Image (cartoon, rainbow, N blue to C red):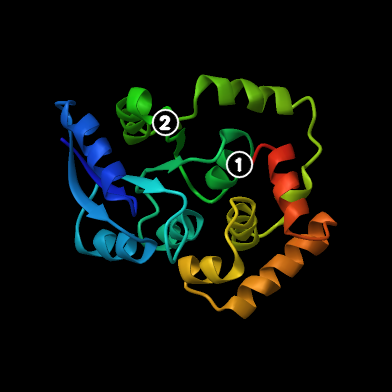
Amino acid sequence: MIKILIADDHPVVREGFKQIISKASDMKVTGEALSGFEVLQKINEQEFDVLVLDLSMPGKSGLEVLKDLKNIKPQLPVLILSMHPEEQVALRTFKSGANGYLNKESAPGELVNAIRKIYSGGKYVSSAFAEKILDSLDNPDKAPHELLSDREFQVLLLIASGKDVDEIAEELFISVKTVRTYRDRILEKLKLKNNVEIAHYAIKYKLV
């Protein structure tokens, strides 16, 4: 029986995934977490075979949790779930240690197969994304946002989604001043002028 920890701060989402997984005879949800901090706590308290992790967790983001897991549970397979398009986000998660990436919109049909794949030692991406990876080999030039740190990239996505500095500070458990510092770095690295241009940039590169 594959023991699964589901980490998502939305109860409805967790319940939906639990219902999907309950229909598979070889796996069971044995733990739930509402934040990045709680994920690490559960991992230390209990044994799991697979972690299903939302990328946009409050406090520690999915990317930060991945990096922490490298130190405490490097062998634990992690399937990242996100609302963000695969094209620009999935590669960053794999570099941080993820074993699979699944867009939430496609999760119901692919979730069980993705869990089985990474549990058995494989990597999981959608067939469409696999094709895009192959296409990118012919065009290796990096997009400007690939130069951002994981935290800067997270702030970029939140700004592009329409959140102001106060909302971002509250979601990430950091100060407003720190959010503004990250925003300034983003503007400088991407050669942008304001939040409107950040939003346009995110749309251009299909980040939202």
Within-10-Å neighbours for mark 1: few <14, some 14–19, many 20+: some
Relative to 192, is 101 on the left or the right? left
Q: Quadrant of the C terminus?
A: top right
Where in the figure is residue 10, as x and y percent of width and height?
32, 50
**Residue, x 80% and y 59% (percent of image)?**
189
Where in the figure is residue 29, as x and y percent of width and height?
19, 42
Whether residue 30 is visible to the viewer of this picture, yes or no, is yes
N-term-proximal mark, 1 vs 2: 2
Q: Amino acid at mark 2?
A: Gly
Where in the figure is residue 95, as x and y percent of width and height?
57, 47
**Residue, x 35% and y 56% (percent of image)?**
73
In terms of secondary structure, where does tag 2 sit? loop
Image disc number at residue 19: none
Give 63 or 157, whichever is nearer the viewer.
Answer: 157
Q: Amino acid at mark 1?
A: Val
Q: Quadrant of the N terminus?
A: top left
**Residue, x 49% and y 67% (percent of image)?**
172
Within-10-Å neighbours for mark 2: few <14, some 14–19, many 20+: few
* Dot in front, 1 or 2: 1
Give 109 or 123, whichever is nearer the viewer.
Answer: 109
Q: Disc 1 designates what residue?
A: 208
Image disc number at residue 122: 2
Say above or below: 83 vs 187. Answer: above
Relative to 131, is 144 on the left or the right? right
Q: Quadrant of residue 41?
A: bottom left
